[in-house]
Image (cartoon, rainbow, N blue to C red):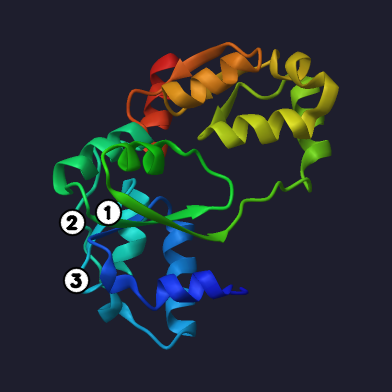
Amino acid sequence: MELFDEDKRIINNTKQYQCIVFTSGEGVRYFFDALYKEGKDTRALGNSKVAAIGCATARELQKYGIVPDIIPVDYKAESAVKALEEELKAGDSVLLIQPKVARDVIPRSLRHHDIDVDILRLYETTQDTSQQEALVNALTAGTVDYITFTSSSTVTNTIQLLGDDALKLLGNTKIACIGPITAATAMSAGLKPAVISDVYTTDGLVNAIVKDI
């Protein structure tokens, strides 16, 4: 992982932030890799509150000996903003760990409340095309009962992977979405979700599918 000068500046000045926000387990791992590369350890977070978006992110932080101070009620960025606003005040500084492509809801909303936000983008998600043929064959054969989408990006990437026949192929199975934001992305792409989980976790999505069967 290559660190740019701005990345190094942020990593070497983590104590200036009142809160450090992790949006995924991947972000946790890449952050600590970068921290160690700069000769730092978990003491660099000692003065900051730590927020984890989602239980999986919180569990990843605990592997590094960090118990999050803030865990929003669900995975939605809007819920994260609400939880952060309850803990922060105007003039505070926040470090947000995000992938290179991410929604801007959290930084935009916090800045609207005069909270300073720096964003550290250490990783990006890429599309795995190795199973493209297998997916097309399974959908064509009608052997897939449900296809699950756990984020808006999974909807977008799947449609790109399937190409021009995406809507036709996905019409052979039920669409299950982890929450309303993912469902909205699916609907805007022309899909009709059959299942939308009320609990925005993998377990919540599984339970919603089980209830639909």
Whole-angstrom CA distance, mark 3 to mark 1, is 13 Å
Position in image of residue 183 (x %, y %)? 50, 20
Identity of the residue drawn at 45% across and 29% down: 178
Q: Could you say where residue 20 lies in the image, as x and y percent from the top left?
A: 31, 60
Element on which disc 3 rests: loop
Residue receiving disc 3: 47
Q: Is residue 213 visible?
A: no
Q: What amino acid is labelled 2 in the image?
A: Asp
How many dots with numbers? 3
Rendered residue at 57%/60% (across/down): 123
Can you identify the residue that label 2 sits on? 69
Residue 114 picture location, percent across and down: 27, 44
Packing grade of label 3 (10 A; few <14, some 14-19, many >=20) is: few
Q: Quadrant of residue 25?
A: bottom left
Across and down, in percent, residue 148 comes to 55, 29
Say which of marks 2 and 3 sits in front. Answer: 3
From the viewer's perspective, is residue 175 above or below residue 17?
above
Which image quarter: residue 135? top right
- The image quadrant where one finds the N terminus is bottom right
Q: Is residue 178 visible?
A: yes
Q: Residue at x 49, y 83 (%)?
A: 37
Proximity of marks 1 and 2: CB atoms separated by less than 8 Å: yes
Return the residue nearer the eye: 190 or 39: 39
Q: Secondary structure at mark 2?
A: loop
